Amino acid sequence: MKFLQYLKNLSKFLICFIPPIVLIIILIFIPTLFTLVMCFENYGNSIRIILGKLEDRNFVNSIYNSFLYTLCTVTLQIILGYLTALLMFFIPKNRFSIFIWIIFFLPYAVPSTVAVISWSMSLREEGFISYVLKYFFNIDNYSWFKEYLLLSTIIVSVWQFYPFVYIGLLTSLRKIPHNLLRSSEIDGARFYQKIKYIIFPQTKKTLISIIVLRILLMFTKFDTPYLMGINNKSNELTLLPTYIYSLINISGINTISASAAMYFPLILVMLFTSIFILLRIKKLVNN
């Protein structure tokens, strides 16, 4: 009987866990292993290409721009996402609040092509942004899209992806017991005290996870920077993903292994950087 019960439990375990394990192997481990094989398939040639690219100014600029782009977009996404989540948390639930929730979430549902086209038109010399700046601040019409392409791309990326932070933090805020907030109001706690001593401690774990995810995702972001810079020849928007894509597109299949070898170590650097940031934030929060 015990043996039959053991087999029954084992069969349940296999039925539940084999499908996700197979998916993890197919979708994660095999592509990762393939990338590693590509990195070291022609190791000597890859090293020569990488060392040669270190003298390429565009390659160095792409690394610098990628770190700058990641830092600015993640920071602004966290700030904007946290503020909108707090706003939705304190707004009373009604039909109007549902409409606001949809408005805040809408940018995340917009395809990158549509977002880039609409923002590129708004940031041109005769676009909506220039008109607003001219009307309210008497600033002459200026082509932000043409002259400040990296800044324009940061603006588009923040607008497009801050709802990820907003949804994650709002979900965490919804889990805070209302009795805790009511007790703080009875004790005379002010708004900033609620945020400092109740809301932030309750959401810090979610916030740390979101920060790490956003760093990794924005560092490898390709579509938005590529679409923003596709009609602009400026090197200002040469990020590492777009640089590697152009390298493969121009030089052909022979540089794919070198491109993988260039990108994989930087992914590891970003991973360890994210872990370092995570540990530093935890230390600051605990103190």
Image (cartoon, rainbow, N blue to C red):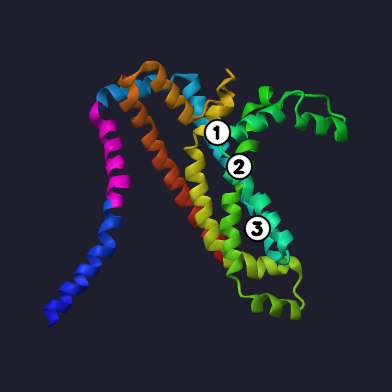
Q: Which residues are magenta?
A: 23-42
Q: Is residue 45 visible?
A: yes
Looking at the rendered structure, the kind of residue marked 1 is Thr
Q: On screen, 107 above or below 132?
A: below
Q: Give the distance between the C-alpha atoms of the residues marked 2 and 3, in whole angstroms.
A: 16 Å
Which numbered disc, 1 or 3, marks the residue that appears first in the sequence? 3
> Left of 12 or right of it: where is 101?
right
Looking at the rendered structure, the kind of residue marked 2 is Gln
Asked whether disc 1 touches disc 2, contact meaning CB atoms under 8 Å apart, the reply is: yes
| Residue at the image point whose x is 27% and y is 40% from the top | 33
Asked whether disc 1 touches disc 3, contact meaning CB atoms under 8 Å apart, the reply is: no
Determine the main secondary structure of the stretch shown in magenta.
helix
Q: Quadrant of residue 160?
A: top right
Image x and y of residue 153, in percent: 61, 33
Q: On screen, 88 above or below 70?
A: below
Which numbered disc, 1 or 2, marks the residue that appears first in the sequence? 2
Q: From the image, tell me which residue sits under label 2.
A: 160
| Residue at the image point whose x is 28% and y is 21% from the top | 45
Q: Give the distance between the C-alpha atoms of the residues marked 1 and 2, in whole angstroms.
A: 9 Å
Which mark is drawn over residue 224?
1
